[in-house]
Amino acid sequence: MADRHEGGEDRPYDAVLETAERHAKAWLRGIRDRPIPPRLGSEDIKGRLGRELPETGEPAVDVIDRLAEGAEPGLSAIGSPRFYGWVIGGTQPVALAADWLVSAWDQNTGLRTITPAAVAAEEIAEAWLVDLLGLPGGSQVGFTTGATMAQFTCMAAARDEVLRRAGWDVETQGMAGGPAIRFIVGEERHGTVDLAGRYLGLGSPIVVPSDIEGRIRVDELRATLTAGGGPTIVLLQAGNIHSGAFDDFGPAIAAAHEADAWVHVDGAFGLWASASPRLRHLVAGVDAADSWSTDAHKTLSVPYDCGLAIVRDAHAMHRALSMHASYLQVTDEGADPHEKVPELSRRARGLPTWAVLRSLGRTGVAALVERMADAARGIADGVAKLPGVEVLNDVVFTQVCIALDDDQATEALSRRLWDDGEVLAMTSRWHDRAVVRFSVSNWQTDAAEVRRTVDAVGRALDEVRAGAG
Ligand SMILES: *Cc1c(COP(=O)(O)O)cnc(C)c1O
């Protein structure tokens, strides 16, 4: 029996967990210095893991060895302080350790009665988050898999409420035959906003033009709002993925509320500006919205996956999301976790968030956010001095978009960086131009890493020029 080899029947977990720990530590120790991109693709990794379903089993320790060794060349060093691809965060040590306990404890965090410890830690984190993000007291926080699902969750509450005001109960009556919902977004919203609208049966959004930094134009928003009526949901953005820009929340939210709209803010990474006294001005007025979605797995640096769905009106959230069933016991202590997220069964994914907040404290969270913004400023200033590099955005937060004179050269620069492996920054298109985008989302990106980044971009640029010349 596999179990007997691995510590006896009463300790079936010990040996396999020690094996996993050894692999995990080796990976984490090497993360700063290994090439960032994966060296092999998924087909090669399938070969290394073994494609055939084994007829008979394999000891647990061997399975974990096989997984760690087989997977290694197909892993990206996402936790590297020079990983700037998309907006993807790393992991603080305390959050990873808490996440291990989440798995070991295996608490199905749907109901307060059965998992009081998980609910307690998540509710403490909930109150801390609402405070840190400067949002209205009593706002509810649901721990989702990410900002995409957080957006869906908040917009489910929005849909319930705007239809209820129009005399329609979407929970019992469904969508067909009900009043149409106007779903208004800015031109440069994140693609997941459309996804949430699709999941909720809202169809394609009404698109309002954005300005040069990607902020929704408030005059255009006002014009759109007054051109029609009926139940309305307006989507605003804290943190544009190309420029880092923030919508002008004060006037935009006021205009939307005048039209009795529900305002949701996609603040996947940008909402964290609220936690910094120095950067808070960027989100001025955001607390007047009705709901906010953000991620803990980006800026806050907890392991994947954790998003945060925050809703001011607890009733709207619970009406839209809670399940009523005879076998679920309800207590008077407050909402059950399942009333705030789409899932019934889920892991206690809020605990790493509790751990990071406990470990950093208010000033530590502010410093974390400011360090990311400072690093973005440093990268922008450093690369702007390199010949032919243009920084395209006003670097107000954590995003930097650069371009060379033509798209081909910009794409060549991005490829060169990928091959070199020291810095990972992805190509994108913004305002009809190829760009290389740096999203600073790692808790370890400091001034030294910024220097290393700028040097690597300089080297890659030299090679692109040499190749072209
Ligand atoms: C990352 C991101 C999302 C989606 O978040 P996930 O956690 O990947 O689901 C939505 N909006 C913005 C602005 C983002 O940066």
Image: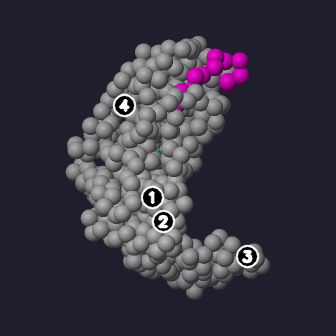
- C-alpha distance separating marks 4 and 1: 30 Å
Segment colored magenta: 174-185
The answer to whether mark 3 and mark 2 are in CB contact below 8 A is no
Describe the element under mark 1 as helix, strand or loop: loop
Name the residue that disc number 1 marks.
404
The answer to whether mark 2 and mark 1 are in CB contact below 8 A is yes
Q: Nearer the viewer, residue 31 or 344?
A: 31
Name the residue that disc number 4 marks.
248
Name the residue that disc number 3 marks.
51
Name the residue that disc number 2 marks.
413
Name the main secondary structure of what is drawn in magenta. Answer: loop
Examine the image and state in which quarter residue 374 appears: bottom left
Describe the element under mark 2 as helix, strand or loop: helix
Which residue type carries mark 1? Leu
**Mark closest to the chain's N terminus, 3 or 2:** 3
**Mark closest to the chain's N terminus, 2 or 4:** 4
